[in-house]
Amino acid sequence: MANITILDKEFELFIPYEKIRSVVEKMSDEMNAKLEGKNPLFLCILNGSFMFAAEIYKRITLLDAEISFVKLASYAGTSTTGDVKELIGLNEHLEGRTVVVLEDIVDTGITIAKVIDQIKSKNPAEVQVATLLLKPDALQNEVQLDYVGLEIPNDFIVGYGLDYDGRGRNLIDIFKVVG
Ligand code: 5GP
Ligand code: MG
Ligand code: MG
């Protein structure tokens, strides 16, 4: 497949959709087994995770599985780490529930750590975390990851929901930046 150009950057095919699909199938099989008998709430972290979340959720065979969507709001820093991220749109009562976070990619791990903190402050019975992609070399602190699709090198990627400056989310396959 020929390389593609988005804005000022060139990208090459990295993970074809067929591979993504087989990874998602494996993850959802594992979830179906682990979540049996529960009433899990899947929580999709917008924007990047919407395709992954849809693809996982339609393969969840438990009739008691619910899904909801939250977005991260960043505020100019009052904390030492820079941005303070808060979940917006979280109206569900999480108290006593099994929550399964669906994230597109874990890079430094800062975002997912904040998400887990926010969710835990609502007193759920249990929090599980699923990420389609993980960059192990970028990870700064240990984070809780219950389901990991694929480990990838420290390259910038787009496609399958992930963007470069708002573009490229509609790509079916995942591409990585050339250079
Ligand atoms: P972290 O807080 O783990 O460093 O970053 C997580 C967030 O950064 C992800 O949810 C995603 O929005 C963004 N991100 C990290 N790596 C990439 C990448 O390679 N491509 C894109 N498009 N976004 C990324
Ligand atoms: Mg994300
Ligand atoms: Mg982005």
Image (cartoon, grey):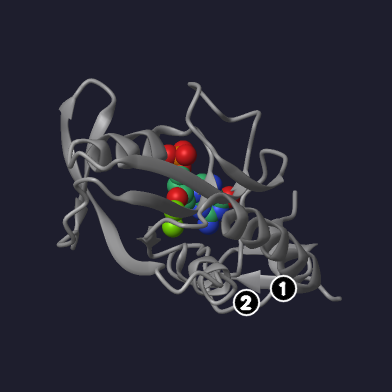
| Residue depicted at x 48% and y 32% | 144
Determine which residue is flagged by label 2: 171
Residue occupying the point 58% across, 55% down:
31
- Whether residue 13 is visible, yes or no, is no
Q: Amino acid at mark 2?
A: Leu
- Callout 2: few (<14), some (14-19), or many (20+) C-alpha neighbours within 10 Å? some
Badge 1: residue crowd in 10 Å (few <14, some 14–19, many ≥20): some
Q: Secondary structure at mark 1?
A: strand
Q: Which residue is mark 1?
A: 4
Q: Quadrant of residue 172?
A: bottom right
Location of residue 139 by image quarter: top right
The N terminus lies in which quarter of the figure? bottom right
Q: Are marks 1 and 2 in contact (CB under 8 Å)?
A: yes
Measured from the top left, where is residue 176 in percent x and y? 70, 57
Residue found at the far front of this picture? 37
User: Is the CB of the residue bearing disc 1 within 8 angstroms of ligand 1?
Assistant: no
